[in-house]
Image (tube, rainbow, N blue to C red):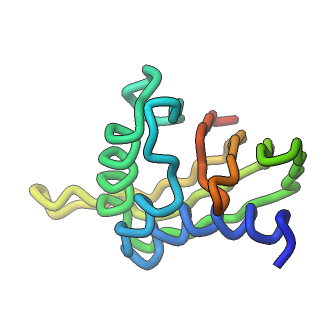
Amino acid sequence: MSDNEEIIKVIETLFQAGITKDLATLRDIHLNDPKFSSFSDLPPYDLKDYQNTIELEELKFVSITDYSYEIKNPKISLFGDTSIVALELIQKGMLVDTKAYTGEHMEMNGRATFVLVKQPTWKIAHIHLSKIN
């Protein structure tokens, strides 16, 4: 598999966790290091570390049923053992409130930037997600 194929597979694994609910994969694809950081399109909007990112991703994916995503126009730039990926992202699903037994359809159109490092496999070192709408 080429570096570009491996890189896009890592990013798809992140969003596939929302479909499969296999949340253990999230720990495998993120760089567990103090250098890791992320910004999200959902609150809280502060800069997050590895542990906070994992916890918030898990919470997001367990709160959404019928989750789907579409990655559009990915641009992968390689710089040795570092990669920057910019893409458009569409996420859909049903936000579920298990206490009130209610749900609300959601669709988020956004942009995403990922920085990955190869150590020895590709890991996400930084994420920046932003809504368009």
Q: In which quarter of the view is residue 33 placed?
A: top left
Q: Residue 123 appears at what percent x and percent y?
A: 60, 54
Q: In which quarter of the view is residue 46 placed?
A: top left
Q: Residue furthest left?
A: 99
Q: Is residue 5 left or right of residue 100?
A: right
Please say if 26 is above or below 89.
Answer: below
Which residue sits at x=74%, y=69%?
6
| Residue nearer the viewer, 44 or 79 | 79
Q: Would you say residue 133 is visible in this rendering?
A: no
Q: Would you say residue 8 is visible in this rendering?
A: yes
Which residue sits at x=16%, y=61%?
98
Which residue sits at x=88%, y=48%?
78
Q: Residue 15 appears at what percent x and percent y?
A: 55, 63
Please say if 118 is above or below 132.
Answer: below
| Residue nearer the viewer, 110 or 17 | 17
Q: Residue 32 appears at what percent x and percent y?
A: 44, 46
Q: Residue furthest top?
A: 46
Which residue sits at x=67%, y=55%?
90
Q: Residue 82 appears at what percent x and percent y?
A: 77, 43
Q: Is residue 107 left or right of residue 27?
A: right
Badge count: 0
Quarter of the C terminus within the rendering: top right
Q: Is residue 27 left or right of residue 29?
A: left
